[in-house]
């Protein structure tokens, strides 16, 4: 416990001399001297000679965390992996396509191999990897570490993903939903930086949200907080792939957007619709404006419940900006209580859609590494 007190003191105040550490922690100079020696041997602190008040002194600072952290983020049709020294410092990254209905085993085997290849390609060994965060575009039950809903991502249902990846790589692994991870990415490095309460909305092929409450990601009791895509906005609406009726996803998900345009525009991809809307195509703009309205109706409830400072829109659809943001703001103003609607700022996320979740995964992996380091120190 005393070692952690010393470590927390230098983490909080920056580099300190041993006399200063004794002052901050209330420990005796002799105790601090012994603890610093132990921490130095454990590689947890760096010692640097300096001069204080004309006398020689040793400055103690936190050693920069060693090794690599990893991220493996699955989309419906691809996987993006990265290894990094910290969330802002990616060492190497790669994207690979995956078959649409791939089995979980196949995806996980590929992810583990890619992570090892990236580490080795960057001049590290596989043993330098300290932690990994896996992202899936599905509700995650954090208690069981499995995909938490039938019908969403069928090839992954009932698979203990975190445990399997942990066995494959021999490091702590955490599994989370990609919207949650993107929210963390925007919170650490993008549009939600410095806020206390905020909502990240991801709108791509599907729709999801990540909630920042009190400066932290809010996962709820079992990890499925923020599943706004399966909030009912029309009780008599179309049947959703989750089994419910009239979910937000059945109105703004790519299937609905593309189906609405098929009679007039033929077969388009979501990317086509976004590009045409940006070029001014009235039909494509109209469908995305309608998406904005539906998103705003669902968000009004969230705004009433959480009173967020910022709602940040991410995912591919965010590229159309005001086409979708304008109707979203109007619907929030119409449906939420005026004071909550007045205090929320609705804007586009700052990180590219294919980057926000990877950055967030690396940030969470960095926390996992730090927890493992602290546990090792506390155990002696
Ligand atoms: Zn649904």
Image (cartoon, rainbow, N blue to C red):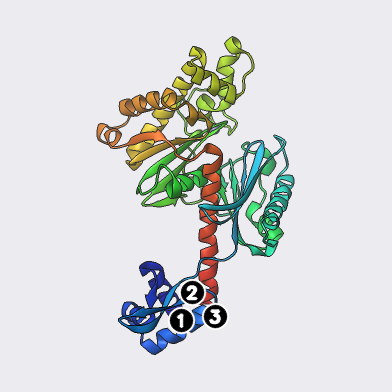
Tag 1 near tag 2, CB within 8 Å: yes
Measured as percent of width and height from the top left, residue 61 is found at 44, 72
Q: Earlier in the sequence, mark 1 or mark 2?
A: 1
Q: Please indicate whether residue 96 sits to the left or right of residue 216 in the image.
A: right
Residue depicted at 58% across the width and 45% down the height? 148
Taking the spot 56% from the left edge, 22% from the top edge, the residue there is: 256
Which is more N-terminal, label 3 or label 1?
A: 1
In x, y percent, where is residue 140?
Answer: 56, 47
Q: Read off the residue under disc 2.
A: 45
Given residues 294 and 62, the one toward you in this image is 62
Q: Is residue 259 above or below residue 104?
A: above
29 above or below 254?
below
| Image height of 291 relative to 231, above or below | above
Q: Where residue 36 is drawn, which disc sits there?
A: 1
Q: Residues within 10 Å of mark 3 (few under 14, many from 20)?
A: few
Q: Which of the image's four quarters has the N terminus?
A: bottom left
Identity of the residue drawn at 41% across and 25% down: 322
Residue at point 35% right, 28% down? Answer: 329
Q: Quadrant of residue 19?
A: bottom left
Q: Residues within 10 Å of mark 2 (few under 14, many from 20)?
A: many
Query: Residue 254 location, x and y as percent?
Result: 57, 26
| Quarter-of-image position of residue 268 | top right
Label tally: 3
Say what secondary structure mark 2 lies in. Answer: strand
Q: Secondary structure at mark 3?
A: helix
Question: To which quarter of the image does residue 350 belong?
Answer: top left
Between the C-alphas of marks 1 and 3, the distance is 9 Å
Gap between marks 1 and 2 measured at Cα: 8 Å
Q: Residue furthest left?
A: 339
Q: Position of residue 183 (x, y in %)?
A: 47, 44
In the picture of the structure, the residue carrying the numbered disc 3 is 41
């Amino acid at each position: 416990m005393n070692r952690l007190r010393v470590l927390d003191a230098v983490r909080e105040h920056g580099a300190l001399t041993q006399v200063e550490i004794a002052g901050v922690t209330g420990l005796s100079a002799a105790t601090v001297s012994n603890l610093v020696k132990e921490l130095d041997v454990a590689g947890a602190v760096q010692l640097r000679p300096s001069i204080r008040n004309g006398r020689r002194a040793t400055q103690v600072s936190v050693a920069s965390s060693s090794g690599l952290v990893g991220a493996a983020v699955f989309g419906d049709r691809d996987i993006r992996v990265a290894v990094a020294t910290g969330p802002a410092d990616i060492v190497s990254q790669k994207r690979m396509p995956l078959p649409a209905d791939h089995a979980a085993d196949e995806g996980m085997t590929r992810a583990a191999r890619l992570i090892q290849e990236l580490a080795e390609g960057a001049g590290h060994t596989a043993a330098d990897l300290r932690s990994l965060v896996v992202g899936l575009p599905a509700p995650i039950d954090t208690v069981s570490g499995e995909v938490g809903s039938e019908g969403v991502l069928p090839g992954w249902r009932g698979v203990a993903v975190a445990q399997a990846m942990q066995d494959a790589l021999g490091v702590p692994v955490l599994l989370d939903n990609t919207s949650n991870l993107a929210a963390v990415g925007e919170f650490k490095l993008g549009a939600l930086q410095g806020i206390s309460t905020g909502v990240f909305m991801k709108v791509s092929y599907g729709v999801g949200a990540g909630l920042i409450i009190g400066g932290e990601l809010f996962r709820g009791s079992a990890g499925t907080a923020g599943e706004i895509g399966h909030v009912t906005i029309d009780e008599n609406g179309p049947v959703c792939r989750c089994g419910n009726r009239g979910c937000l996803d059945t109105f703004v998900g790519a299937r609905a957007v593309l189906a609405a345009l098929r009679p007039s525009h033929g077969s388009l991809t979501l990317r086509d619709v976004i590009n045409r809307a940006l070029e001014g195509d009235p039909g494509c703009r109209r469908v995305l404006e309608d998406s904005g309205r539906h998103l705003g109706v669902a968000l009004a409830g969230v705004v009433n419940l959480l009173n967020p400072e910022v709602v940040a829109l991410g995912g591919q659809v965010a590229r159309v900006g005001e086409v979708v943001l304008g109707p979203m703001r109007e619907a929030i103003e119409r449906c939420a209580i005026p004071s909550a609607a007045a205090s929320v700022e609705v804007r586009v996320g700052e990180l590219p859609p294919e980057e926000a979740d990877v950055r967030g995964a690396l940030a969470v992996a960095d926390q996992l590494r730090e927890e493992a380091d602290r546990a090792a120190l506390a155990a002696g």
